Amino acid sequence: MSTKNNAWEYADSIESASHINLRKQYGLYIDGKWVKPSSNKYFSSSNPHDEKHIADVSEANEDDVDRAVQAAAKAYKLWSKISAAERGKYIFRIARLMQEQARELAVIESLDSGKPIREARDIDIPLACNHFFYYAGWADKLEYAFPNQQKKPLGVAGQIIPWNFPLLMAAWKIAPALATGNTVVLKPAETTSLTALKLAEIIEASGIPSGVVNIVTGFGDTGAALVAHPKVSKIAFTGSTAVGKLIQKTIAGSNKKATLELGGKSANIIFDDAPIDQAVEGIINGIFFNQGHVCCAGSRLFVQENIAEKVIRKLKHRMQSLQVGNPLDKNTDIGAINSKEQLKIIQRYIDIGIKEGSEFFQTDCALPVQGYYCRPTLFVNVAQSSILAQEEIFGPVLTIQTFRTVDEVIQKANNSPYGLAAGVWTDKGSKIFNLTSKLKAGVVWANTYNKFDPSSPFGGYKESGFGREGGLHGLGAYLK
Ligand code: NAP
Ligand code: MG
């Protein structure tokens, strides 16, 4: 374990995390002001590591959502008219302010979501800043992005995000919407509102006109009110396939545009000519990054039969070295499961797997006595028909299947209701090209996994949703 002499490196409690500055109670950020929720109801945001209360967060009802949308509609009249270069400057300023507060944002993200500080510090927060920088650059170049197309913004974008990458998902949503001249009402997930509220403070400090960005916190019904609001022209949703289907029903027959980024059950495929040690690292990163709370997690591993024994032996050995523990410890590899509910869901799937009789392996590391923790878990020789191989678990649980031929693995990998991502590990470029064209997945990584960049589009097929975020494609989704 690391030493406890530096709150940044190790903080047992919120009190000792001295770099952070949080309010006791957060209002809603509407029309450039912090306002009370009209119901006067607040809910607690807590730390999944020790179940301690962090801050009170406002519960927005339909009236509050209406106030936020009206403010965004009013601000749209101004924002869509100011020069594109000016819009870019505000977005750039937001990026710079985020960068200045990156350490604090990382600590808050780790505290509120349970993700390892190392991941928040090195991946989530820098990527979130980079999304703002990237889209700031596009703001005054839209005519080059879409030559001769006379593109126009859509209006008010209603944006709803999940709890696995809270600040990063806020950045994915807000940055391209602003760059294209839209205004925004964003609803974070109920268990992870705090970095979105810190972002609201940053947005306020950027001096961007009031009402251009509004942040309303709350539960599922807050999101539903945003989706149903008649003045919202575009819904950008990241979350579960079940809620994505509800949203589609609500907006059917309306003029609302939508992008839905939903669940996944992505295949990570290892051929016998792959560099095995690198592939094992890729398997670990694919499934255990962010406790497996990753929509594109490589949760179905396919290993070529003749190397399966070797790969599984090395994988188990590597898994034993993973540190599960306090997310704020910089040596932690696997942090806390985001909520008690999510831990129950994961545990239920593990119980199903054990009952089905697949070979089961869990590391024997010690877990913190309090909080929501799950050991890294494997199921070997899982049948294609098993619930474990079909449904998204959204936790540190990997299923392993074997294959003999290329055609067989393509058929098995595509045999899923989802189509978000895939990984291919091989020494042969021709095999990579063959698979990338035949796998029904929005993103295919070759000899790597879970790599993200603001310039590359992301999104799924089938029940993983539709529309693309990131890159040039991410701009198109906010224009007509
Ligand atoms: P979720 O239950 O669908 O929640 C996502 C967001 O929608 C939350 O802000 C939630 O609010 C809100 N919400 C809930 N019910 C709603 C409704 N009826 N109408 C409008 N909004 C509603 O998903 P989650 O459990 O937070 O996240 C896990 C899921 O997200 C996984 O399935 C994962 O694969 C998917 N995901 C996909 C991607 C991608 O890019 N494809 C990325 C990340 C996550 P509350 O928090 O208050 O419930
Ligand atoms: Mg929390």
Image (cartoon, rainbow, N blue to C red):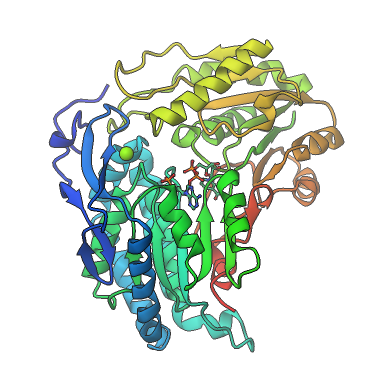
The x, y position of residue 364, in whole percent, is 45, 11
Looking at the picture, tell me which residue is in the foreground, 184 or 228: 228
Write the residue at 45% across / 83% down: 140
Quadrant of res 223:
bottom left
Write the residue at 35% across / 39% down: 113
Looking at the picture, tell me which residue is in the foreground, 436 or 175: 175
Write the residue at 33% across / 66% down: 214
Tell me if residue 172 can be seen: no
Please state the quadrant of the image where ligand 2 appears. top left
The x, y position of residue 318, in whole percent, is 51, 21
The x, y position of residue 279, in whole percent, is 61, 32
Q: In this view, does 15 lie to the left or right of 182?
A: left
Q: Is residue 101 left or right of residue 67?
A: left
The x, y position of residue 420, in whole percent, is 64, 47
What is the total number of numbered labels drawn onto the structure image? 0
Q: In this view, does 436 lie above or below 412?
A: below
